Structures are given as structure tokens and as C-alpha cells.
Image: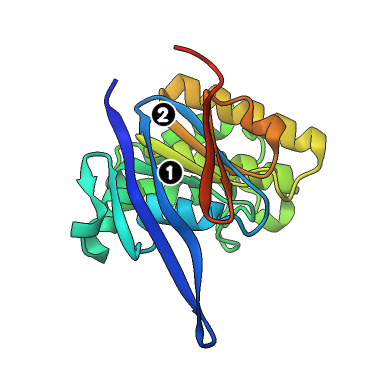
Amino acid sequence: MSKILNVEHLGKTYKSGSKQLTVLDDISFSIESGETFAIIGPSGSGKTTLLGLCAGLDYADSGAVNLCGSDLGSLNEDERAQLRNKKVGFIFQNFQLLPTLTALENVVVPLELQGAKSPSKIGKELLGKVGLGDRLHHYPSQLSGGEQQRVALARAFSNKPSILFADEPTGNLDQDTGDRVIELLFELNQEADTTLVIVSHDLELAQKCKRILQLRGGKVVSNEVLIES
């Protein structure tokens, strides 16, 4: 298997008044193509910051990230955006759907921007897979939290990403709804053979993945394989 994400000696600091706050300190790990990988740790451990650096949403202060064969440090903003559009999917805790677009439009618009053929057909198929075939023309405000996250799932897989980053995907959902969303996430992921990276404080969710990276205080405290190939 080839490495789809390789992180070497990554560091990130922020200014807090007159002080420097180290959020990530010398983080190194790699993820193989097709792997399911969880990043866990308490609040403030640097999980979301690490995800942002791995996905090219932010710049590291030290170290290197190679994503889908590209050294992110050598890419400008436009090149990073192009890489994300072609290779990367995202699922966020707060859904991030466009409120003025219907469920179908939220899935279709990214496909149209990428010049996909039959975007509406693809969108309807994906929404059908997540159980929203009868909600195509509903706006986010007309959908429950679980339904909104299922729209976000369909959108995340619409460009057939090589790697998908999910940041606390069940954080705003009740237990039963969250369980169903995770079930769908893993089903779609297996079907698409996508590399899945989940950031969560939920150990039960993390244990569904092949490997768990644990952070504490901005440092790696363990990198454990749970499921052998």
C-alpha cells in the first residue's frame, strides 16, 4: 500500500498576548491509502489544528505534510484549493451546509464547479444512499441535525475523494442519530475505498478505525494499530 498522508516533525505555535503557545510539537505519522485512522485526545490537545494542517487548510510553522503525493509546503493557496477539490472530502461537526440551497443543490453545486457529468443524477443517487431520497428539495432549516449531517456525508463523497477528513462528525448529534451517521460513513467509505481520517474525543467511535493516534498537550502519546491487515 502507498502512503496517502505523511506527516514529519510537524509543529504549530500561536501568539497569545506576549507569549508563544505551542499547539503541536514534533508530530510525525503516516497513513496508508484506504486506511481508517482516528485522531483522539482531550479538548485542547491539538486534534482540529492537526487536521487543518494535514488537509492544507492552514500552514505549519515547522515540519512537512505530504498529501496525495504533493508537498503542501510547496503549494500556494490556489494549488492547495485545487488539490482539496480533486482529492479531499470534509465532514464537519456543524454540517456547513449552505442555508439558501436545497439538500440536492448542496450536493450538486460542488460537482458542477468541478465540471462533473450528470451532477444531478450523482447527487440524487448519493442522497438516496443516505436515506434522503424524499428530502431532495428540503432546505437545511427544514431538516433535522441528523438529516443535515447525512446531506454533508453525501456531499463529502460526491467528488469521490481519495481521503476524507471528518472533524467530530457526531459532535452535535444525539447518540442514536450519531450512531446511524457513523454507520453510513463507514458504509460509504468502504464502498468508495476512501482513506478516512476521523478527529474525535469519542473512544468508541475511534475504535471502529484500524489505527488510533492519541494526542495530549500537542504531542503524540500513542499510535496504536487496532485491526491488522
Residue 61 or 85: which is nearer the viewer? Answer: 61
Residue 192 or 4: which is nearer the viewer? Answer: 4
The x and y percentages for residue 56 are 35, 56
Residue under label 2: 194
Q: Disc 1, disc 2: CB below 8 Å? A: yes
The quadrant of the picture occupied by the C terminus is: top left
- The answer for how far apart the CA atoms under marks 1 and 2 are is 10 Å
Identify which residue is drawn at 49% across, 66% down. Answer: 22
Dot 2: within a 10 Å radius of its alpha carbon, few (fewer than 14), some, or many (20 or more) residues? many
Q: Which of marks 1 and 2 is nearer the N terminus?
A: 1
Residue under label 1: 89
The x and y percentages for residue 30 are 36, 35
Judge whether residue 114 can be spotted in this image. no
**Amino acid on which the number 2 mark rests in the picture:** Thr
Judge whether residue 54 can be spotted in this image. yes
- Check residue 115 in the rendering and tell me which mark sits there, or answer none: none
Residue 145 against residue 130 in the figure, above or below: below
The x and y percentages for residue 182 are 65, 31
Residue 79 or 55: which is nearer the viewer? Answer: 55
